[in-house]
Image (tube, helix red, strand yellow):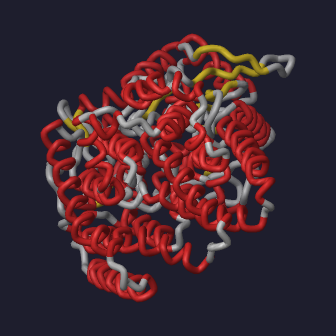
Amino acid sequence: MRQDIQFLRGLAVSIVILNHAGFWPYSGYLGVDIFFVISGYLITGMLQKQISENNFSFVSFYARRAKRLLPAAFTTFAFCAIAAPFFLGSQELQSFKEQVIGALTFSANMVLLSQAGYFDGASELKPLLHIWSLAVEEQYYFFLPLFLFLLPRRYWVVGTMLVMLSSVTLCAYLMRGHPDSAFYLLPTRAWEMGIGSMVALTRLDITRPKWTKVVFWPSFATVLILPFMKLEFSHPGAITGVICLATAIIIINQRDFFQKNPATRTMAWIGNSSYSLYLMHWPVIAFANNAYMGDQPASVRIMLIAIGVALGLALYYGVERPVHKAKSFKPVTAYSAILGLLVAAFLVPLKLSATSQANTAFPIENFRDPNAGLDMACSQNGKYTPYLQCQSSSSPTVALWGDSFAMHLAQALNASKDANFVQATRSACLPVLRYSQFAESGRNNKEWAIGCIEFNDDVFASIVNSDNIDVVILASTFKGFTQGDPYLAMVKTSDNMQNSSPISEKQSLTALTFTIDQLRSFGKKVVIMAPPPSSRQDMSACLERRMKNLITFNGGDCSISIAEDKTSYGKETQLLKRLSEIADVGVVDLRENLCTDTKCLTILNGIPLYRDWGHLSIPGSAEIGKQFNLYANLIRIAR
């Protein structure tokens, strides 16, 4: 067993655990990239030897992989399945069911991509989030033997280089507009494992050219220091390449240094159990993230690391190591037994949880459902289409225009017997003319911003061309007017040119007042609906935990403190106050109804008001509309 590789494994799992525990949340995930290079090197070296000696068997290869990886993995899945009904809310439990399916089918990366981005807040609540990297490796293990077996040996190096070049190119392309896809998918991460494969195929680990010896110590320093540096970079990207190349240089050198140095030997000892530690540490943290409302103090995070490490070592010495060393072990038998245990452990508690009754006037599972307003079709993505299902009547006199914070008002407006409105909404798209926020990369990029501006042009045209509509409600989170780096403002000028600049209050107020003036010039009245009080925490999860008696460490009364709300919406509240003065426009703010001097309600007459951190739930929106006569108040204030 090579001490240098075990050292790298120990270092990789250590920095990943520290990163996940929040002690160094900047570049610690680079540890996964170290694992990728190691995996590519070891698997390719083994395949190269067996194929060259005409001793390769697909059945034997995949059986050995199953024996090495599946018992510990399935034990982890079973552990998570047993714990899930006691820790996870309805949404998180549904997500977990999909994660289990992805984990069992080695498609966890694709399942997680379909659920949410890795850097989204919800990712912190997924017990099997970390299995995405194992899925990527397993997919690489599936295709690599076929690739090497079918391709003539003289083309192995060239073929691998072409695959790596294609992978890097695709990765760079997707990072601009689809960073989640670039992060999760094998085609965009294959180049990292390909670096390890190239080391084995070119025999650099045997020839050890002089230049590799010269760059050893800089490479060693890189893997020690780079993951702990506070860097702002896209991942995977150039920094990812640096850490992968540094890892490859260390593997090539095979220095005795790692065997002789006590510190590196200790890290290598950790590396022996790195697979089990990786499997077990994150579920412990994720379950705690679900049960702990608010930021966890350092003492709690240290305790979580200790529990995760203890469970990881138990998994290593109790399952992984004995099974791996057992000569008579039959992978198929073990697979069936553990899978049966998993299904039983998961489905029985889940069934009991699903049949439990909550003390509420409506199904508790429903209040955290997505709230797109009158219909899911009202959450539009392309050009604006005035769908009939997005109207409360055949001849609406009011237009509800905005982003998802307009969507969640639809039930509140519809609670009035006089409701007569059309919903024109697109998620994250501010209800203003000739303006949108954007980021250079990610979902809300330039292309998205241009689409948002065009959507709003269509909405405006639909409103002003309607003889019936006389009131326009502009509703939004309004954060697109206050966001800083990496967001910029896109402004469409009169000659249809889109100019980019840092977001500023002056520019934001100009866009809002211009929109209001344009609507009024066509005889339309305007009113602004402020976003409701909010906390950075998901209060709907807190409420559900209380109602279902799920394990909760510090939920309190699930209210939103005034201090939290000011942190969340202080800038937006001041912006709307300034807009009210400049444009003489009415602003309706639910804080007047829901908040005292110290806190804001999240439950009204037994009805949970929120479905997540800031959006109103379907029943909560309806209750607010009924209790505060919201529709009539908005019409009255419009001018």
Residue at point 63%, 21% (across, down) = 489
Is 586 situated above or below 4?
Answer: above
Residue at point 63%, 29% (across, down) = 438
Q: Is residue 240 visible?
A: yes
Q: Count the marks.
A: 0
Whole-percent x and y of residue 223? 42, 31
Residue at point 34%, 40% (across, down) = 11
Horizontal side of residue 432 vs 614, given as left or right: right
Whole-percent x and y of residue 205? 56, 42
Is 300 situated above or below 358?
Answer: above
**Residue that extends furthest to the right in the rendered view of this protein:** 495
**Residue that extends furthest to the top in the rendered view of this protein:** 506
Whole-percent x and y of residue 584? 53, 18
Where is the N terminus found, in terms of image quarters?
bottom left
Looking at the picture, tell me which residue is in the foreground, 75 or 328: 328
Looking at the picture, tell me which residue is in the foreground, 82 or 361: 82
Q: Is residue 573 visible?
A: no
Horizontal side of residue 559 vs 245, given as left or right: left
Horizontal side of residue 596 vs 377, given as left or right: left
Residue at point 55%, 78% (across, down) = 60
In which image quadrant can residue 72 be found? bottom left
Where is the C terminus found, in terms of image quarters?
top right
Is 142 situated above or below 293?
Answer: below
In which image quadrant can residue 29 be found? top left
Is 615 situated above or below 47?
Answer: above
Looking at the picture, tell me which residue is in the foreground, 229 or 550: 229
